[in-house]
Amino acid sequence: MLLRHTPKEITERSALVINPAKTCQPIGAMYASLGINGCLPHSHGSQGCCAYHRSTLTRHYKEPIVAATSSFTEGASVFGGQANLLQAIENIFTVYEPEIIAVHTTCLSETIGDDLKQIAIKADKEGKIPAGKYVIGAPTPSYVGSHVTGFSNMVKAMAGLAESSGKKNGKVNIIPGWVEPSDMRELKRLAELIGVDYTLFPDTSGVLDGPLSGEYTMFPKGGTTVQALKESGDSIGTLALGEWCSADAARQLDAKCKVPCSVLDMPFGLKATDRFIDALRIVAGTTVPDEVTYERGQLVDLISDMHQYFYHKRVALVGDPDQLISMVEFLVSIDMCPVHVVTGTPGKKFEKRIKALTKDMPFEVKVKAKGDMFLLHQWIKNEPVDLLIGNTYCKYIARDEDLPLVRWGFPILDRQGHQYFPTVGYKGGLRLLEKILSALLDRKDRDDPERSFELVM
Amino acid sequence: MARTKKLVQWEPNDIKAELLKKYPPKVARKRAKQIMINEALENATPEIVANVRTIPGIITMRGCTYAGCKGVIMGPTSDIVNLVHGPIGCSFYAWLTRRNQTSASGEKNENFIPYAMSTDMQDQDIIFGGEKKLEAAIQEAYDLFHPKGIAVFATCPVGLIGDDIHAVAKKMKEKFGDCNVFAFSCEGYKGVSQSAGHHIANNQVFKHMVGTSTTEKTDKYKINLLGEYNIGGDGFEIDRILKKCGITNIATFSGNSTYDQFASANQADLSAVMCHRSINYVADMLEVKYGIPWIKINFIGASSTAKSLRKIAQYFDDKELIDRVEAVIAEEMPFVEAAQQDVLPRTKGKTAMIFVGGSRAHHYQDLFKEMGMKTISAGYEFGHRDDYEGRQVIPTLKVDADSRNIEEIEVEPDEKLFRPRKTPEEMETLEKNGLHFKEYNGLNPDMDKDTIIIDDMNQYEADKLIQIMKPDLFCAGIKEKYSVQKLGIPQKQLHSYDSGGPYAGFKGAVNFYHEIDRLVNSKVWSYMKAPWQENPELSATYVWE
């Protein structure tokens, strides 16, 4: 047993988090920043933050993750980090020549009270920001929220670039939330199929799914351009995917530039994708082409074909709120039973949503926001499940409890493919179903005794 | 499939100038001192500037003090609960990512490595202080796990808000009675790199654990292995060899370590130092307080492994051991040599660059030499001048503001436990016969004249250097891996290896030969261009055959 010190008996913990189901805000901000064209993310704190975030993102995406740091020393921590950030801005624009620097704070710079806005104004006054280039900033103290809210805060800072000319440009803003580059690419494909003129932000496709061609460029062609972000204020509407990841930015656009918004669930699974496609066609005033309806039918077909293996199977899930909400809905829609659901990200709303989605299930559903994987493991020990869905860290639980595991979420450090194969949309739904079925049936094939081992299943 | 290689001969000085060209003048001046053209074997080796601040905005490879303390030194210990006091991230990122393996050989087979524990500080803890929460978290960890030891690590905000983690640890230790609780003030902003964290960890491990065991170790040929972290099972392979030779490893600092190992370290008769940078403080303190001499060894590379074993045998000066070591080397080497002969035709003449660590950029050159590969440029991420130029420069090192705030602990000979292992005469004879104590000559003398040695290498300089010198292999960390590989040049991660290992010892050398052969000769590097990119001109009409 790898996690052999985890007791079955659950005791209340008030102060100790064990095996977290979240990480800190800055890494989310860094990932979001990479979805801006020509952007260098900058971590305003000590070197380690930036090194850890880059390492984790690199291991997950298997792509170069470049980001700079203010390299705080003890002196900067005492006297404030303004001098470090000013110097960093000057060095970055001189050496790396990005279009934009997206600065996020850390627990260190927040605790000492550095004011990003004021420092950016000073940098501008001192001529450290070349003409036509930008510095944006997002507050992401690590002691608030989680990586998810950090992502959201940076997306909000991106929306802060929006300007309103008073004339609508007919585009629809799509804020995808923290999904993979493959998912962002798929969302764009769907929008194009439906004939929607869109601005997707952030957009890490074309940045973090680059080819190997013997050339390296620090700023690949992908990412939402600053120009597009500026023009997002003239869009006819915003679809924000995910309350936790995307709603704040959408609401800010609404308040600042009067771009009406609709907050949807992330389009994982049949129903959430249906709502996304429907919302997209309504806001853009287009008709959904047969091709998309055909893809939907294929997903329904696969659900029908696989239903016998899914029916009433008990599932434990751990991950981020927006993803889990859609996934739980999807599992319920195929008659699986998501019985244990944990996120490390805070939010009572999450527990309410999951409860509402599962209220008709024939089992009691345990759900916790601000939980951890230690608790999830204890729940599983007390009430076993047939399947576990979550990030790579789940493999320790899966091995100890001998559970099939579907890797889905962040981070995935020991398998590949998530950069390229989407799980959003109808096509993404096909992939999720395939993964779930393979996990369940591989297990059955392994476990079935000789007399009932079968070729045709 | 052969890669076309443009061979432009650059003078080292021109390369250096090219690396600095784009920097703002202030940055260029600073970086110029950290880029050195080697004058190996000359008496006047130019001085390199190392262990100084990274310039803000320059994309460094370095991490922080917390990473050096909790991540490197304390992370590999199996039966000590590591509790991180701070917001969640620091604990999360150091969770199982360094690939420290363990056989969990503690008394009760404890293994806390798969657990990340944190006080997950929230904004109210930052405002009102986090000591109460830390106290409660220690209590909860104790109640759940009943470990022998709980190590508490401070992250950045803890130092700023002034939580007294040492007082909390002391209070809880006294309360429990059967659990040693101690703390590390390893806030990320201290020092200039991971290196400060190593030092902080060394001090606390020494203060709180070493010498506390009451069980007497009666085995023969007792050593401590310092600065080995069992990444990818390196320590397992070294332990296999030591055991085969009949050498008893009392304590590894800190790969696959247990509480009891640290506690018994004072009973060894020799300290063998692998990673000089991260652990030399403990080696010195063990000598002063308990009388254990130390030598520098290196188990990276088969010939270095053999040499190190011979040095250990020479120290104990016992024919039985000397013969046993020779027999083991003779038994192990044919397997190594066979692998060497297998890869040599494909690796000979290839070039490598290594920018890692405080030791590995030096140690791994031995492995490359065994494969006929030359290291054409190297440098440390967090080394000090002594790691480049040798320990003789230590007295001349300037202590700057960033080093001054790292505690130096003064130790004195222990009244009861200090015991000289050799007489002054014996030591002198050993020295005369070529066994040098407390000696490390650094990286520079082992590199060719005119090679470029770069301290605290960064993204921009790496990119430039690769484009100019076109090495066949680049070695650095995970952050550097894919930007290098996009250029069509294989990268080997030499911090935690990405995957694979062990690379230490004899079997490790064989693994490494195969791994590097795989990397530098992979067919994938020949697929960079599509046929229509190689021949873009449509010169003739295609005729169907």
Image (spheres, rainbow, N blue to C red):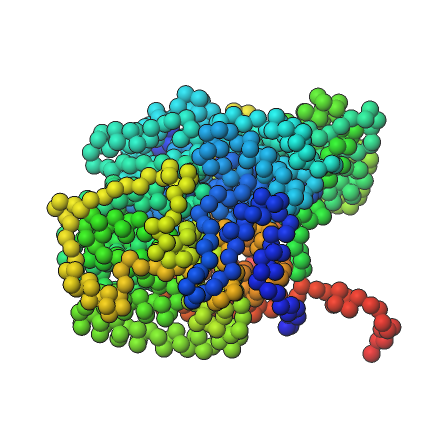
- Up-down relation of residue B241 to residue A70 (above or below): below
Front residue of this view, candidates A55 and B306: B306
Quick one: which residue is furthest to the left in this view? B416
Instruction: Classify residue B494 as left or right of residue A417.
Output: left
Residue B322 position, x and y percent, is 22, 72
Residue A445 position, x and y percent, is 49, 56
Residue A326 position, x and y percent, is 60, 35
Question: Which residue is painted at 59% across and 64% down in the image?
Answer: B11
Q: Quadrant of the C terminus of chain B?
A: bottom right
Question: Which residue is painted at 43% across and 65% down in the image?
Answer: B42
Instruction: Classify residue A151 as left or right of residue B373.
Output: right
Front residue of this view, candidates B11 and A414: B11
Question: Which residue is painted at 39% across and 59% down in the image?
Answer: B442
Asked whether residue B244 is in view, the answer is no
Q: Quadrant of the N terminus of chain B?
A: bottom right
Front residue of this view, candidates B312 and A76: A76
Question: Which residue is painted at 67% across and 58% down in the image?
Answer: A215
Asked whether residue B389 is in view, the answer is yes
The quadrant in which residue A246 appears is: top right
Count the labels in the image: 0
Quick one: which residue is furthest to the right in this view? B541
Instruction: Classify residue A155 as left or right of residue B436.
Output: right
Front residue of this view, candidates B408 and B458: B408
Residue B205 position, x and y percent, is 28, 44
Quick one: which residue is furthest to the front in this view? B44
The quadrant in which residue A357 appears is: top right
